[in-house]
Amino acid sequence: MLANSVTGMLDGSATKSGILAPIAGFGNCGKDRFAVVAMIVDALGVRSAPHPADVRRQVDTKRFFWLDIFSAEGAASELHLGELDLSETDIAWALRFGQAGRMLIGRDVIRVVTWMAEGSGNLIEIHVICSPQGVVTVWNGDASALDEIRQQFAERVCGFEDNVYHAAGILLQLLLGTLDHAIRELDVMLDELRFQIDKDTSSADFALLTRRRQKLQSIVGGFNRYSSAVRSAIVGVEALPGMDSRGAAELNDYAEQVEDVEEQFQERRRWLSDMMHDYSTTIAERQMEQINRLTLVSLIFLPMTAITGFFGMNFEWMMKALSSKEAFFVLGLALPTSCVVLTIAWLAHRRMIPFRLRPKSSRASQSNIAAAKERPFNAKDIAYSELRFPEKPPEDVMG
């Protein structure tokens, strides 16, 4: 899927961020130690939720919150989801990765499969479930990738905790903003490729360019399908029960931002396609130049090769007739040299061998140029006779 194709796009190798180490907590109480796999975000701030009981206590407070599960591998994440009174179908859906991007907006529920980006530019698949209790996100990656977003959500949650659609629109926009990291990394990669191609075409690896274009096409194709799913889901959201004007406005803004990101990905794909086209054109021109050089060399030495083949025949009468030193100097040296010179002259006459002579500037012109550079500009130096004005003004195009 999209996240798998994007991970390691810049260096061709997939990287996986490590999960936070198990906490040292719980002292000697005899309780099992749990790794920090989730964070709780509400109006009180951001805090870790290493134990499923932390989620249950948050649910009992009846306060709207965001449960961010950033380590979906293992039984701990399933236990956390189980404390939210979600159905087995929703839990299985949230933990199943490799899905296509989609968006479903129903009555008091929103389910989204989308992507976020780490600071390094790697895209990560993230699942979002919104209900009147709160918002749940499930993904695999480094927890610090969403530190800033968690803080922003905590500062804004008081303004939309009474409406799940409003909260979902805000959170989805914050997650979409992380894709700027991926776009920035794409720009860096494209700049490096352009510099490499412009500097030395032979150093560029065409197979590597092809693989990167295929991966970028996979990104664009997956995001195009997701953009279509978002547009379809947004149609008529104002008519849903419980939808207010603020929630509908935030969801519509999210749909517009998704289209903008889609256009940015498509623009990068066009840039890479143009680079590959320029690269192929440059390689073809270089190969044609090499073929032309070989052809010219063959034409130059073709007459001499024919003469050599003719006089190289081992006829006894020919060897006796050409045994003198004069015959060697005339037929062995002068004739081949003349053939080469005449062939080069003929090719130059036909402009098949260009001779470019650099013009030599005179000392007077060089001194005039130097004096002009040292002399300050004066508008009076422009003669009035050199100015050209039309004899009559042009006719008005509007008649």
Image (cartoon, rainbow, N blue to C red):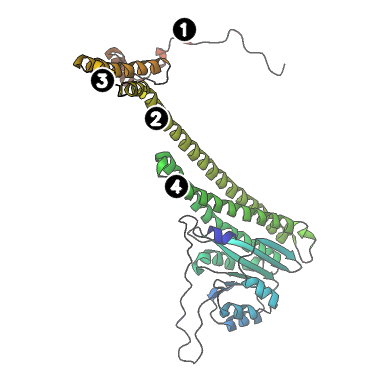
In this view, the residue in front, 301 or 249, is 301
Looking at the image, is mark 2 or mark 3 earlier in the sequence?
Answer: 2
- In this rendering, which labeled residue sits more in front, label 4 or label 1? 4
The amino acid marked with disc number 1 is Ser
Q: Taking 176 as reference, is 71 above or below it?
A: below
Q: Earlier in the sequence, mark 3 or mark 1?
A: 3
Query: Residue 294: which numbered mark, if any?
Result: 2
- Residue 75 falls left or right of residue 91: left
Q: For the residues labelled 4 and 1, say whether their Cβ atoms are less than 8 Å apart.
A: no
Mark 3 or mark 4, earlier in chain: 4
Q: Could you say which disc has been placed on residue 205 in the image?
A: 4
Earlier sequence position, callout 4 versus callout 1: 4
The percent position of residue 321, horizontal first and vertical second, equals: 25, 15
As drawn, the label of residue 57 is none
Q: How many marks?
A: 4
- Whether residue 359 appears in this view of the structure is no
Mark closest to the chain's N terminus, 2 or 4: 4
Circles 3 and 1, Cβ within 8 Å, touching? The answer is no
**Which secondary structure lies at badge 2?**
helix
Position of residue 126 measured from the top left corner of the image (x, y, whole percent): 60, 65
Q: CA distance from mark 2 to mark 3?
A: 34 Å
Question: Which callout, 2 or 4, points to the residue nearer the camera?
Answer: 2
Q: Which residue is mark 1?
A: 385
Q: Measure the C-alpha gap from mark 2 to mark 4.
A: 25 Å
Residue 346, image x and y in percent? 39, 15
- Residue at image mark 3: 319
Please tell me how crowded label 2 is: few (under 14), some (14-19), or many (20+) other residues with Cα within 10 Å: few
Q: Is residue 200 visible?
A: yes
Of the residues under marks 2 and 1, which one precedes in the sequence? Answer: 2
Q: Residue at x 50, y 39 (%)?
A: 280
